[in-house]
Image (cartoon, rainbow, N blue to C red):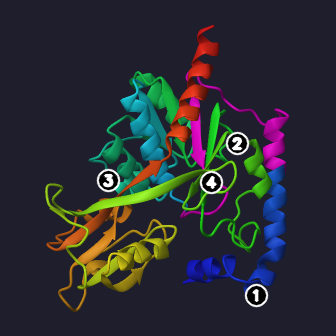
Amino acid sequence: MLARILQHSWYRNFGFVTLLLLPLSIIYCAVSLLRRNLYRINVLQSTRLPVPVIVVGNITAGGTGKTPLVIAITQYLKANGYNPGVVSRGYGGKATHWPQPVTAASDPDLVGDETVLIANRCRCPVSAGPDRVAAARALLSSHPCDVIISDDGMQHYALARDIEIAVIDGGRRFGNNLCIPAGPLRELPSRLKSVDLIVANGKARNHEYAMELKSYAFQSVTDAAKLKSLHEFEGKPVEAIAGIGNNERFFQQLEALGIHINKHPFADHHRFRQKDLIFKNENPVLMTEKDAVKCKKYALPDAWYLRVDALLENRFYELLNAQLTDLLGKRDG
């Protein structure tokens, strides 16, 4: 409930909640700037790895489409002869020690939902842990990775980065332009001037590269071999559940397909229980792919997730490849 109230105030006009939280936002913003500057002047130390590091992140709290972008970049690198590895915080994971190796069969309750999703889609080495330097070192010690992708690592300055890619919500942009908790910002928009590439999930502006989240089918939550077309549920009532950073985007996707949905929004990274998935009627249950990795352990005979892929313009990949090639050339030289 609190998260929904905050999100509503972030992307609406100023109100009582915004004004009440404004002093905390000023403090948050000041601490964020101070911390970044301490790394810039080497008071706080960053660790540089022996392979290039690509950081994919955002300056707002959740819901920008970062995970599909990480997957798309990783798959592109694999298809072009690289051996990428991915490190992630493992947000929501309850493991007692870190870092943790992650595979498609890992328990999302232990290592986090996004990391399992990435491992499942990319089939590459993945390591999770709050200390991304330790997670990356664990990858390099056990796999022949020649490039590391840090998922949601823009503010994790302890890990030195060679390429920074920021993803923003092309529709909601930066909301009220205030820092957490009065607004959605982790860092000020001026931070984007220092990144290498900016990806907009949706409509792109100058110096941004558009990303489209394209859906092709619904896949069974419990049986990967079962698919349904995008038109399968058209005109039919369903129970739509979502526990991601921007639930409304998912609900709008379903409605655009002509589906009559009963909305069941949850907080981002919600730890689903069996009772969350039981409804009075017998309607099919539709969910996001990130939620599906947590729900496949339950007996759900008619539950489906909308598989999405991030589509980006070729120019984005050309620039990324050129930067990576230049980095490797300098290191070899």
Q: Secondary structure of the magenta portion, mostly?
A: loop
- Which of the marked residues, 4 or 1, is nearer the chain's N terminus? 1
Q: Is residue 58 magenta?
A: yes
Q: Give the residues drawn in magenta, as a range.
A: 34-63
Badge 2 local density, few (<14 within 10 Å), some, or many (20+)? Answer: few
In the displayed orientation, state which residue is furthest to the bottom: 280
Question: How far separated are the C-alphas under marks 3 and 4?
Answer: 26 Å
Given the image, on which type of amino acid does mark 4 rest? Asn
Residue receiving disc 3? 107
Foreground mark, 4 or 2, reads 2
Membership of 108 in magenta stretch: no
Nearest-to-viewer mark from 2 and 1: 2
42 or 70: which is nearer to us? 70
In 3D space, how far apart are the residues under numbered discs 2 and 1 (Cα atoms)?
A: 32 Å
Residue plotted at (54% across, 61% down) = 202
Question: Which label number is shown at residue 100?
Answer: none
Q: Residue at x 65, y 44 (%)?
A: 156
Percent x, y of residue 325: 56, 21
Identity of the amino acid at label 2? Answer: Val
Identify the mark at residue 15; answer none if there is no mark: 1
The residue that label 4 is drawn on is: 58
Among the 4 quarters of the image, the one containing residue 54: top right
Q: Quadrant of residue 179?
A: bottom right
- Give the Cα separation between the discs numbered 4 and 1: 25 Å
